[in-house]
Image (cartoon, rainbow, N blue to C red):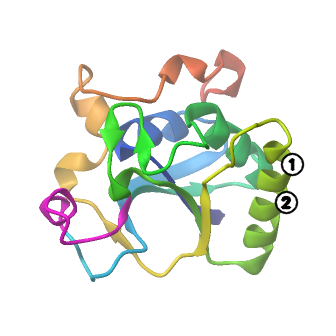
Amino acid sequence: MKRIVIAAGCFWGVEAYFSKLKGVEATKVGYVNGNTNNPKYEDLLNKIATHAEACEIIYDEKVISLESIFEHFFRIIDPTSFNRQGNDVGIQYRTGIYYSLEEDRIEAIKYIKEKQKGYHQKIVVEVEREIGFFSAEDYHQKYLDKNPQGYCHVDLSLLKNKERKNN
């Protein structure tokens, strides 16, 4: 199994989307690359913590490639929007790819460089070494499964049936 952490705005929809993908074995929402250890959601809201809301993705590279994960990531975000996705605005809603392995950094940079050719505006997705992923509170985990009417900027219908688990 491999692991990557992505930030794509509010983490509820990101987790809901990626958890349904074939080859994704586990997801967890949390906070990444900020100024403190073990931040709480309220710390982000009160601008005490500078972390991004993020989703940890554990995946089977024999079933889904990292490039395919990046394709899905770009499908659900506006990569030119700085610190904002949908109606959510603030540093915690920035977009980013947070890696542990150098090979993942290289692949992310290559992917974004290629995608940039299709955009007039600059892509503002961070690519940074992960310097701390802290699990979000339990009530945030699988939030949209527990609260199907919850707000989500991610359009879950973008996930095609052939890409879903159990199809």
Whether 60 is drawn above or below 76: the answer is below
Res. 140 in view: yes
* Residue with the mark numbered 2: 110
Q: 145 or 86: nearer the eye? A: 86
Res. 22 in view: no
Mark 1 element type: helix
Q: What's the amino acid at mark 1?
A: Glu
The residue sitting at 30% across, 31% down in the picture is 145
Mark 2 element type: helix
Quadrant occupied by the N terminus: bottom right
Mark carried by residue 114: 1
- Magenta stretch in the rendered image: 40-52
Whether 81 is drawn above or below 58: the answer is above
Q: Residues within 10 Å of mark 2 (few under 14, many from 20)?
A: few
Whether 118 is drawn above or below 30: the answer is above
Q: Is residue 130 left or right of residue 53?
A: right
Residue lying at the far front of the rendered structure:
120
Residue 44: x percent and y percent?
22, 62
Residue 109: x percent and y percent?
78, 63
- Res. 60 image quadrant: bottom right
